[in-house]
Amino acid sequence: EKAGFDHFMLKEIHEQPKAYRDTMLGRISDDGKSVELKEIGMTTEQIRGISRIHIVACGTAFHAGLVGKTVIESLARIPVETDVASEYRYRSPIITPDTLVIVVSQSGETADTLAALREAKRNGARVLAITNVVGSSVARDADDVITTWAGPEIAVASTKGYSSQLIAFYLLGLYLAQERGTVEEAKVAEIVAAMNKLPDQVESILEQANVFKGVAESMSKHDNLFFIGRGLDFAVAQEGSLKLKEISYIHSEAYAAGELKHGTLALIEDGVPVIALVTQEDLYEKTLSNIKEVKARGAHVLGVANAGYEGEVMKSVDEVFSIPRTLPLLTPALSVVPLQLLSYYASLARGNDVDKPRNLAKSVTVE
Ligand code: F6R
């Protein structure tokens, strides 16, 4: 059942190219110029009437929502707030009939997410769910559902669940933008063409999976490490940090690279591993200067950079891993893969139960 892989997590990491293809299938017009989400019942008028969006989820699904916020804001120009479900419910958020609430849940059964969904509906919002389980509680209660077609996720640590949620957000962002007229057809075509390349690009990262073994082994000897990045890189850093904590039990934190000097830099001492994501072209220089700050304090830095820019990054880091070139908005769908592999091999190096980390359950049905 693990199809020759040692763990479900590794199998599921390798299923991501298929998860991307299946999630896009039938949702892009034949000419590649528009996104078709027939499952969305909102009329063009309703979509044009949306004044704000709340994205609500837990854990890894919340991290997908952080990427979703940038995607929707940049394409459809609708203001988006993100909340973890356990906070959203109790902070009396401002929900109006023209608020669209997007809940994200791989399992569709997370108690806090479900309760947030019901709270949003009680307040008159329309609720759109992004979920991987057809017929789940979240799918049943939502007004509109975008199913991620990642297939069953068995490992407690979510991998293909997260990345297929990113694909769903790209499709949704494009769709909302088309309906609101905030994006040119040529731009949609450009993004769609780049999305179509993602499965093969993930494949090419997976072919180098073994590269991460050595790095993860030396990482696994540390008790503390940091992930840094700006913009979408910061969103992915947060997911990388959660994944590592969850299965390797190594303490780690993710920081917006520009925030380091406001406190965290004090924690950087000789040999502390720092994983720096440098994939956002317009922020390259800024992130590089932050990397130099941690290097100067003795950090051991692993850079994750775009192909073609890794030479420049290498001047400031100890090791660099390059990911294939795509559009800046789409890089999370690639950059998360090396982070998943690092966590996997770090967990393995520590002799942990990769698929069933201590204290955690796959589906959190208690509040
Ligand atoms: C981490 C992880 C959890 C889940 C969270 C929400 O790898 O799997 O953080 O993402 O419990 O679960 P779903 O998406 O099923 O609502």
Image (tube, helix red, strand yellow):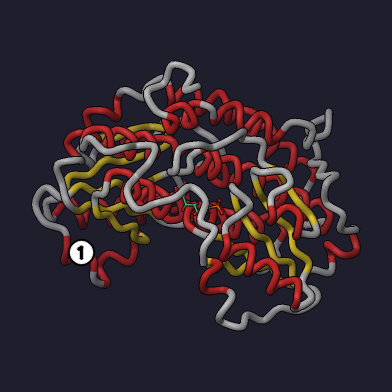
The quarter of the displayed image where residue 153 is located? top right
Using the image as rendered, state which of residue 311 and residue 69 is in the foreground: 69
Q: Residue at x 72, y 58 (%)?
A: 76
Q: Position of residue 89 (x, y in %)?
A: 59, 75
Q: Secondary structure under badge 1?
A: helix
Residue 330 seen in the figure: yes
Horizontally, residue 220 falls left or right of residue 248, namely left
Horizontally, residue 282 falls left or right of residue 78, namely left
**Residue at the limit of the structure toward the left, as seen here:** 270
Q: Residue at x 76, y 59 (%)?
A: 142
Horizontally, residue 186 falls left or right of residue 333, namely right
Q: Position of residue 240 (x, y in %)?
A: 38, 47
Q: Label 1 neighbourhood size at 10 Å, few (<14), some (14-19), many (20+)?
A: some
The quarter of the displayed image where residue 20 is located? top right
Q: Residue at x 59, y 35 (%)?
A: 152
Q: Is mark 1 within 8 Å of ligand 1?
A: no
Mark 1 lies on residue:
265
Horizontally, residue 183 falls left or right of residue 347, namely right
For residue 361, above or below residue 215: below
**Residue at the limit of the structure toward the top, as seen here:** 4
Q: Residue at x 51, y 56 (%)?
A: 364
Residue 316 seen in the figure: no
Mark count: 1
Q: Position of residue 215 (x, y in %)?
A: 23, 33
Using the image as rendered, state which of residue 37 and residue 292 is in the foreground: 37
**Which amino acid does the dot numbered 1 rest on?**
Leu
Q: Position of residue 216 (x, y in %)?
A: 24, 35
For residue 139, above or below residue 132: below
For residue 227, above or below residue 193: below
Using the image as rendered, state which of residue 232 and residue 98 is in the foreground: 98
